[in-house]
Image: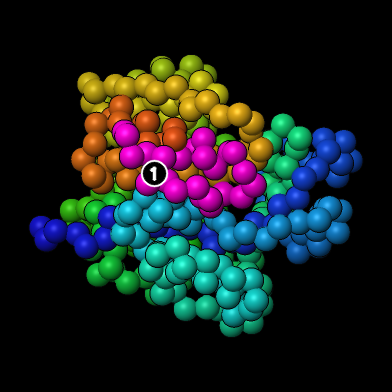
Amino acid sequence: MTQPSIDVIAIGNAIVDVMAPSSDELIAQLGLQRGGMTLVDTDRARELYDAMGPAREISGGSAANTLAGLAALGAKCAFIGQVADDQLGEVFAHDVRAGGIAFATPSREGEPPTARCLIFVSPDGQRTMNTYLGASQFLPAEALDEKVIADAAVLYLEGYLWDPEEPRAAMRKAIAAARGAGRKVAFTLSDAFVISRHGDDFRKLIEAGEIDILFANEGELAALTGIEDYRQGMASLAAKVPLLVVTCGAEGAVAQAGDDFARVSAEPIDKVVDTTGAGDLFAAGFLFGHVRGRSLAESLKLGAICAAEIISHYGARPEADLKALTATV
C-alpha cells in the first residue's frame, strides 16, 4: 500500500449557512423544533428567510466544516460536494479553497440553486436548522475521482447526504474505492432523523465491516442501537466498529477502540454563543489526532478544544488559531 498524500477526503453537503439571532418565541411561532434540523422545500425556505432578522452568510455543511477545522490544524484535505453555478456556489467554492482544501467538483448548471441552511440561534446558543438541499442532493457518482479517494488516509462521510438517492450511490462508490485501497472509512451519523430514515442501511454497513470510525452523539447512538444508555449502546457496537466516538454535550465525549477506552470533559468557555458546528469541529480535532497517530485521550482532547472554539462565536468555521489552541496537547 502506498503512503497517502491526503489526510482526509470528505463527501458532504455543499451548503451556505444563513444565520440570525432569534427568540424562542419566534421559533415556536414558526412551528420549528427548537434545536433540531428540518429539511425544507423552496417555498418554506423563502418563508423562513423572510421571517429572519439580520443574517450572516457563512459557508457550511457538516463535512466541509470538519475539513475546515482539519485544514486549520495543518491536515491536508479534499472535499467532494455539489454546488450550482450561481452566486452562493461561488461563495462556497471560494471559502473552501481559501481554507486550503482541495475542491474540484464541477458546478451544476441550472436549477436547483446551491443549498443553504437557515439557522435560528436562540439566546442560549442553541441552533434550530432548516436545510434546503438544492443542488447538493444531485452529486453524481461520476463526479468522484477514485484515484484521489484512494490517495487519502481517511474517507469521511456525512450522514446528512445519505438521504438523497444520487449522492448515496456516490458514497457507496467512494466506500468501495477507499476500502479497495486499504484506507479507512469514517462516518458521522449527523442526526436522529437521518437514522430514522436510513438506519437499516447504516446497520448493514456496520455489520459488513465497512465503517472503521463512527461518530455519533448520545441521541444518535440511541436511535441507531435502540439502547438509551450510551455506554451499553457503545458496548453493543464495540465488536463491529474498530473506533467509536460519542459526544455527550456539556458532559464531554468518549471513545472506544477495542479494549482501549478514553473520556474527556468539555472545555470550559465564558459563554456559549452558537452551538452550530460543535460536533463537526469535534470530529476535526479527533480525526487530526487520529491521522497523526495520537492516543484516544489526546485525540478526544483535540476534539474538545476545537468544539469549544466553535461554540464561542457565530458560525461553524474556526476563527481562532487552532494550532495555537492545541499546541500543548
Asked if the stretch drawn in magenta spans residue 328, the answer is: yes
- Percent of width and height locating residue 83: 56, 71
Report the side of 243 relative to 5 (left or right): right
Is the residue 281 above or below the residue 102 in the image?
above
Residue 222 can be seen, yes or no: no
* Numbered-mark total: 1
Q: Quadrant of residue 249?
A: top right
Q: Residue furthest left?
A: 1
Secondary element at image label 1: helix
- The residue shown at (81%, 62%) is 46
Q: Is residue 159 left or right of residue 131?
A: left
Q: Nearer the viewer, residue 143 or 285?
A: 285
Among all residues in the image, which is located at the extreme bottom? Answer: 109
Does residue 50 appear left or right of residue 157 in this picture? right
Q: Which residues are magenta?
A: 306-329
Q: Can you say whether 320 is above or below 214 in the image?
A: below
Neighbour class for label 1 at 10 Å: few (<14), some, many (≥20)? few
Quadrant where the image shows the C terminus: top left
Residue 329 versus residue 69 in the image, above or below? above
Query: Does 184 lie within the magenta span?
Result: no
**Residue found at x 58% / y 75%:** 90
Q: Position of residue 299 (x, y in %)?
A: 32, 35
- Residue type at the position of mark 1: Ala
The residue pinned by badge 1 equals 324
